[in-house]
Image: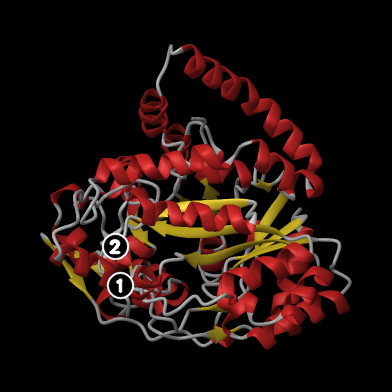
């Protein structure tokens, strides 16, 4: 039996230019089935013609698996149709299929999807392959949804795996190995933990794992870093759901990296402002270990918004976190969420002022998004604020809601304008990227400078208006940068 696992080609263009990271989940699944079948992984977001690639490849495989988030779901369906026409069986997995399994099962547009692997995929996918080989019944595979006649049967969920049961990823299964870089340096992912015990209302993680936090042994993590480097990585991204839930453990990870002489690699992670801001010693050790980039979940400066989002109080966590990171020459990116129920224009611009005051290198001005099955969606729907159910636009950058004071278009425009105004000459002076990655920064400035200069000139001459560029960027999906 031959299995092909595909990541989605749909990405947010601005993020992709800064960091194009290969899938980690698919090589992890590959490691759990490579002894019972032939398995390959293809990260489609590195290709210019992904559908042509799948059309050519699919006839050679018996089972094609696709993973997707909400904004990637429609493309997964389209790729699934290509695989089905080629004679392969099709299975979906990932956040959106897990949360939306019942709706997918009832949808006429998803009739060619024969299986859904819900939640954590490694053990369920292995048993699916065994069932397809006639070694067990589909009904006995926990966490599996499967077609039976005209309907889809949803088996009971699978309990979370013990970390001792999860094998290291099989990176040799990858068919596409070029084109994955962050700031020009080849990058790969290594997980150190799974899950989060926080209760953020907008997040889907609790629906995948419940409120849990499982830690991989640090010797396994170090071995996986070495494997990623052996496969060409010069930079490592830790995609943990909340790596700073255990601050002391992250310190120990830094110490383990130093002891293993792996500080020549460049490490990046996502973290909470509370966790980073809780310990200068932690951030100093991160700097010593080779960390040079952290994405901080700040969410909002507004206390009422933080309460609505289930984030508690921010106090001065963001200030301290950014201060500690800046002191260690670590690039700071922040997630800031606007478009909350009580937001007016000034409330949204509060996030801009916070980012500018802290001199954040890459603020990401997200728009509150009513992701399926989250508490956030339920509350926003009850308020009558959800304006779109087009999942193609559920990427955090498009406005799918209004507030009590702003229309969806006004929320979208303000968010675009904040991005457009942030990256100015002042940003050119204070950002750390130009010092840490001068080559990448110079090439990126050469790429975007002509367009920026042209926009400025057209605006000054009155040939174009800001709204023209807003609609142009909206059509292209490039919403993180601009010029007004």
Determine contact: label 1, label 2, CB under 8 Å.
yes
Task: Give coordinates of residue 150: x percent, y percent.
Answer: 10, 59
Establish if 201 lies above or below 162: above
- Residue at coordinates 42% horizontally, 80% vertically from top-left? 312
- Residue at coordinates 54% horizontally, 46% vertically from top-left? 15
Q: Secondary structure at mark 2?
A: strand
| Badge 1 or badge 2: first in the primary sequence | 2
Q: Secondary structure at mark 1?
A: strand
Nearer the observer, 19 or 479: 479
Residue at image mark 1: 144
Which of the 4 image quadrants contains residue 275?
A: bottom right
- Toward the left, the furthest residue is 150
Colour scheme in use: secondary structure
Nearer the observer, 40 or 263: 263
Task: Give coordinates of residue 431: x percent, y percent.
Answer: 71, 48
Task: Give coordinates of residue 117: x percent, y percent.
Answer: 35, 68
Nearer the observer, 43 or 318: 318
For the residues marked 1 and 2, what is the alpha-carbon distance in whole angstroms?
7 Å
Nearer the observer, 340 or 36: 340
- Residue at coordinates 70% horizontally, 39% vertically from top-left? 428
Residue at image mark 2: 115
In the image: residue 251, left or right of residue 213: right
In the image: residue 331, left or right of residue 141: right
- Residue at coordinates 32% horizontally, 76% vertically from top-left? 143
Residue 400 - label: none
**Callout 1 environment at 10 Å: few (<14), some (14 to 19), or many (20+)?**
many
Establish if 194 lies above or below 388: below
């Amino acid at each position: 039996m031959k299995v092909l696992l595909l990541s989605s080609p749909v990405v947010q263009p601005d993020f992709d230019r800064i960091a194009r990271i290969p899938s980690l989940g698919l090589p992890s699944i590959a490691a759990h089935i490579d002894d019972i079948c032939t398995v390959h992984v293809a990260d489609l977001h590195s290709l210019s013609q992904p559908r042509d690639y799948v059309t050519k490849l699919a006839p050679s495989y018996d089972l094609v698996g696709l993973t997707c988030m909400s904004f990637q779901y429609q493309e997964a369906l389209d790729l699934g149709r290509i695989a089905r026409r080629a004679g392969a069986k099709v299975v979906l997995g990932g956040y959106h299929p897990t949360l939306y399994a019942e709706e997918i099962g009832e949808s006429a547009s998803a009739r060619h999807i024969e299986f859904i692997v819900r939640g954590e995929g490694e053990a369920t996918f292995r048993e699916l392959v065994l069932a397809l080989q006639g070694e067990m019944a589909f009904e006995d595979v926990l966490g599996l949804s499967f077609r039976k006649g005209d309907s889809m049967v949803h088996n009971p969920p699978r309990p979370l795996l013990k970390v001792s049961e999860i094998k290291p990823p099989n990176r040799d299964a990858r068919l596409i190995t070029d084109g994955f870089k962050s700031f020009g340096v080849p990058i790969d992912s290594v997980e150190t933990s799974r899950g989060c015990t926080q209760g953020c209302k907008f997040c889907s993680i609790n629906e995948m794992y419940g409120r849990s936090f499982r830690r991989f042994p640090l010797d396994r993590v170090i071995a996986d870093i070495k494997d990623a480097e052996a496969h060409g990585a010069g930079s490592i991204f830790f995609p943990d759901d909340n790596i700073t839930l255990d601050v002391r453990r992250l310190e120990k990870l830094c110490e383990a990296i130093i002891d293993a002489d792996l500080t020549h690699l460049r490490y990046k992670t996502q973290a909470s402002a509370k966790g980073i801001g809780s310990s200068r010693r932690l951030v100093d050790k991160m700097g010593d270990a080779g960390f040079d980039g952290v994405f901080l979940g700040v969410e909002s400066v507004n206390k009422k918004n933080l309460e609505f989002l289930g984030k508690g109080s921010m106090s001065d966590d963001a200030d301290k976190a950014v201060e500690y990171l800046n002191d260690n020459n670590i690039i700071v990116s922040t997630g800031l969420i606007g478009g909350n129920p009580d937001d007016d224009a000034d409330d949204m611009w509060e996030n801009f002022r916070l980012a500018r005051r802290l001199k954040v290198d890459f603020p990401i001005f997200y728009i509150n998004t009513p992701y399926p099955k989250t508490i956030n969606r339920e509350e926003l729907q009850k308020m009558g604020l959800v304006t779109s159910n087009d999942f193609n636009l559920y990427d955090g950058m498009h406005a799918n809601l209004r507030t009590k004071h702003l229309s969806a278009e006004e929320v979208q425009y303000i968010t675009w304008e904040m991005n457009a105004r942030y990256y100015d000459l002042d940003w050119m002076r204070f950002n750390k990227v130009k010092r840490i990655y001068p080559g990448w920064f110079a090439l990126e400035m050469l790429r975007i400078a002509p367009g920026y200069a042209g926009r400025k000139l057209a605006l000054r001459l009155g040939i174009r208006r800001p709204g023209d560029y807003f609609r142009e960027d909206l059509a292209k999906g490039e919403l993180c940068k601009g010029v007004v």
